[in-house]
């Protein structure tokens, strides 16, 4: 292995959702915590279940399994707390995951145009090819609301 | 050399809030935002019906001089299971009287956390933020978030139409007599 390829190794956290594994850049991960009480209140944002209290912070719980697997998780063992960017701001979000997570070093292949928007790239590990998730497109935020509003306006404008 | 005076820790800013229920769900509102608390029955005599297509949460209006208060069904506003409200909060500096199930208690909040940015739809107008009380997270409502300016325009138009048709009916009766 040459020095230049060693430098391209990055740290990722592998998470499990059902039978599939996904990766998130390790610098976006805050911690992995046991499930705690989810506080629910009325809202209109899809994919958000409610919030949990963690170290005095109120953290939204975002279930991404339906978007990634096409089905909701039946069992959840942990919440992976990740840092989500909203422009210049950063906030924690909690994602329910099925099993324990693993920290690995791997080289990421960049996503191509034909990949889904939530794919930041790909990595190879233990004989599996694993999607690296782009949390900014996978989880809701103001930019999603704007895009949805624009889409509904377009649909209304159609004769 | 003179040392800087020690900074006194400022006392935590607190706010009096009222915890109330709508369809079993707990909410909070600043007590300073509540001008009156009335039983729904006491207002029913003074309320007149109003109907705006697509705005089912407002069914009644109360006239107070030249001011109209629109009674907003809290359960319908939040998309909860509709229950018959027992109390009305007349919200200060708004034209809203909010129909709720009941008051839980009055208490003090020491910290209002902004609604996380993941929440990106109407709830951003509904809530000022979230507060943690006794290990429970409670949304703190925005008094002006129950009726948007667009909804108020629709309601005022419906009110004007109702007034005009009532006046026309009266004229018809007068001329017939």
Image (tube, rainbow, N blue to C red):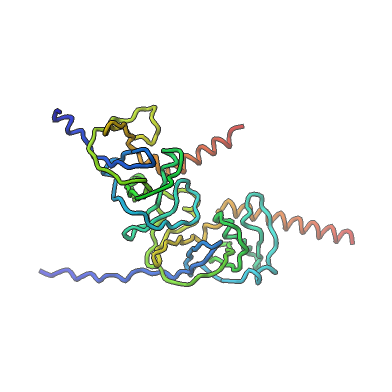
Q: Depth check: B85 or B135 in front?
A: B135
Residue B92, percent from left and from top: 53, 66
What is the x, y in percent for residue B1? 10, 69
The residue at the point 57 percent across, 60 percent down is B74
Of the 4 image quadrants, the one containing the N terminus of chain A is top left
Image location (x, y in percent) of residue B95: 58, 62
Task: Locate the C terminus of chain A by quadrant.
Answer: top right
What residue appears at the point 23 percent right and 69 percent down from the top-left corner? B7
Q: Quadrant of residue B133?
A: bottom left
A45 or B149: nearer the eye? A45
Note whether A59 is above or below A65 in the view shown. Answer: below
The residue depicted at 70 percent of the width and 69 percent of the height is: B45
* The quarter of the displayed image where residue A10 is located: top left
Is A139 located above or below residue B66 in the figure? above
The percent position of residue B17, horizontal first and vertical second, equals 46, 69
| Left or right: A96 in relation to B66 | left
Up/down of B164 relative to A22, above or below = below
Q: How many tags in the picture?
A: 0
- Relative to B90, say whether A83 is above or below: above
The extreme left residue here reads B1
Residue lying furthest right: B177
């Amino acid at each position: 292995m040459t020095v230049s390829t060693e430098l391209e190794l990055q740290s990722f956290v592998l998470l499990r959702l059902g039978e599939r594994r996904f990766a998130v850049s390790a610098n976006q991960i805050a911690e992995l915590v046991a499930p705690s009480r989810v506080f629910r209140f009325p809202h209109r944002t899809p994919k958000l279940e409610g919030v949990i209290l963690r170290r005095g912070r109120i953290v939204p719980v975002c279930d991404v399994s339906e978007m990634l697997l096409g089905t909701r998780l039946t069992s959840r063992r942990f919440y992976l707390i990740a840092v989500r960017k909203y422009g210049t701001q950063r906030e924690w979000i909690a994602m329910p995951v099925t099993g324990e997570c693993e920290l690995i070093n791997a080289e990421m292949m960049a996503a191509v145009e034909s990949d889904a928007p939530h794919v930041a790239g790909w990595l190879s590990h233990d004989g599996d090819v694993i999607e690296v998730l782009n949390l900014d497109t996978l989880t809701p935020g103001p930019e999603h609301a704007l895009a949805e509003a624009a889409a509904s306006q377009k649909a209304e404008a159609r004769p | 050399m003179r040392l800087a005076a020690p900074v006194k820790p400022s006392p935590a800013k607190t706010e009096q809030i009222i915890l109330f229920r709508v369809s079993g769900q707990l909410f909070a509102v600043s007590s300073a935002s509540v001008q009156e608390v009335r039983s729904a029955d006491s207002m029913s005599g003074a309320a007149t019906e109003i109907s705006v297509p697509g705005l089912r949460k407002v069914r009644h209006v109360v006239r107070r001089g030249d001011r109209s208060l629109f009674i907003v069904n809290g359960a319908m506003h939040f998309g909860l299971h509709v229950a018959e409200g027992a109390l009305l909060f007349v919200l200060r500096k708004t034209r809203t009287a909010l129909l709720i199930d009941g008051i839980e208690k009055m208490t003090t909040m020491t910290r209002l956390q902004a609604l996380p940015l993941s929440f990106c739809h109407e709830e951003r107008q509904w809530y000022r933020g979230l507060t943690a009380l006794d290990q429970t997270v409670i949304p703190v409502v925005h008094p002006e978030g129950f009726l948007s300016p667009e909804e108020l325009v629709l309601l005022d138009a419906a009110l004007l139409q109702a007034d005009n048709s009532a006046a026309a009916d009266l004229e018809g009766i007068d001329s017939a007599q």
